[in-house]
Image (spheres, helix red, strand yellow):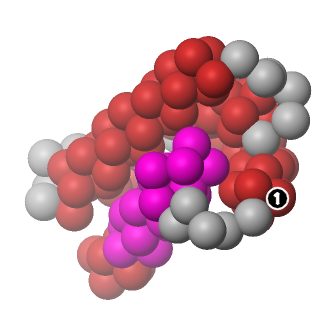
């Protein structure tokens, strides 16, 4: 939508895939207890059961985000209209913008400091790639 240069689009898509993969790895660390679940989901998770449910949702969503980026850059489903990938990335950009605002309101200050810049970057990159 905004960028016509395919080399820049490919670089942005690579950065997005790397960031989403890093987020998946982080959430796996939460699931395995290597990172306390008190610093995710706004610091509002109260039980291990809630953590497993929300982390499974997060991991699944991030896998689907990678899938959308791969569709947009033409690696998967080349027969799909380009509008699909663009629309999906615009929706993701809005989602990450709201998530950035949510991170600013998080109970845990570590989440605010650590994840606000990441979600802002994701929103910006999704918008640029759309």
From this viewpoint, is residue 92 visible?
no
91 shown above or below 23 = below
Please name whichever residue, 54 or 82, is drawn nearer the observer in this view of the structure.
82
From this viewpoint, is residue 2 visible?
yes
126 shown above or below 116 = below
The outermost residue toward the front is 79
106 shown above or below 49 = above
Q: Which residue is mark 1?
A: 83
Please name whichever residue, 45 or 86, is drawn nearer the observer in this view of the structure.
86
Q: Main secondary structure of the magenta part?
A: helix
Q: Secondary structure at mark 1?
A: helix
99 shown above or below 56 = above
In the rendered image, residue 51, in percent from the top left (x then y), is placed at 36, 71
Q: Tell me where residue 4 sits by quadrant.
A: top right
In the rendered image, residue 39, in percent from the top left (x then y), is placed at 42, 45
Q: Which residues are drawn in magenta?
A: 54-76
Question: How many numbered marks does the figure carry?
Answer: 1
In the rendered image, residue 97, in percent from the top left (x then y), is placed at 79, 41
- Is 79 positioned to the left or the right of 90 in the image? left
In the rendered image, the quadrant that contains the N terminus is: top right
- Is 3 positioned to the left or the right of 61 in the image? right
Q: Residue at x 33, y 51 (%)?
A: 24
Q: Residue at x 22, y 63 (%)?
A: 31
Please name whichever residue, 88 or 102, is drawn nearer the observer in this view of the structure.
88
Please name whichever residue, 73 or 20, is drawn nearer the observer in this view of the structure.
73
Magenta highlight on residue 129: no
Magenta highlight on residue 74: yes
Classify 10 Å Cα crowding around label 1: few (below 14), some (14-19), many (20 and above). few
In the rendered image, the quadrant that contains the C terminus is: top right
In the rendered image, residue 58, in percent from the top left (x then y), is placed at 45, 64
Q: Residue at x 62, y 49 (%)?
A: 72
Q: Residue at x 39, y 80 (%)?
A: 53
């Amino acid at each position: 939508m905004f960028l016509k240069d395919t080399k820049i689009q490919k670089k942005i898509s690579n950065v997005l895939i790397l960031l989403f993969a890093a987020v998946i790895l982080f959430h796996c660390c939460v699931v395995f207890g290597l990172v306390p679940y008190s610093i995710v989901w706004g610091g509002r998770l109260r039980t291990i059961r809630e953590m497993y449910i929300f982390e499974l949702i997060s991991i699944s969503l991030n896998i689907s985000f990678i899938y959308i980026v791969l569709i947009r850059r033409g690696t998967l489903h080349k027969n799909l209209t380009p509008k699909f990938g663009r629309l999906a990335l615009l929706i993701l950009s809005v989602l990450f913008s709201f998530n950035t605002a949510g991170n600013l309101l998080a109970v845990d200050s570590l989440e605010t400091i650590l994840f606000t810049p990441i979600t802002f970057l994701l929103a910006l990159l999704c918008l640029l790639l759309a």
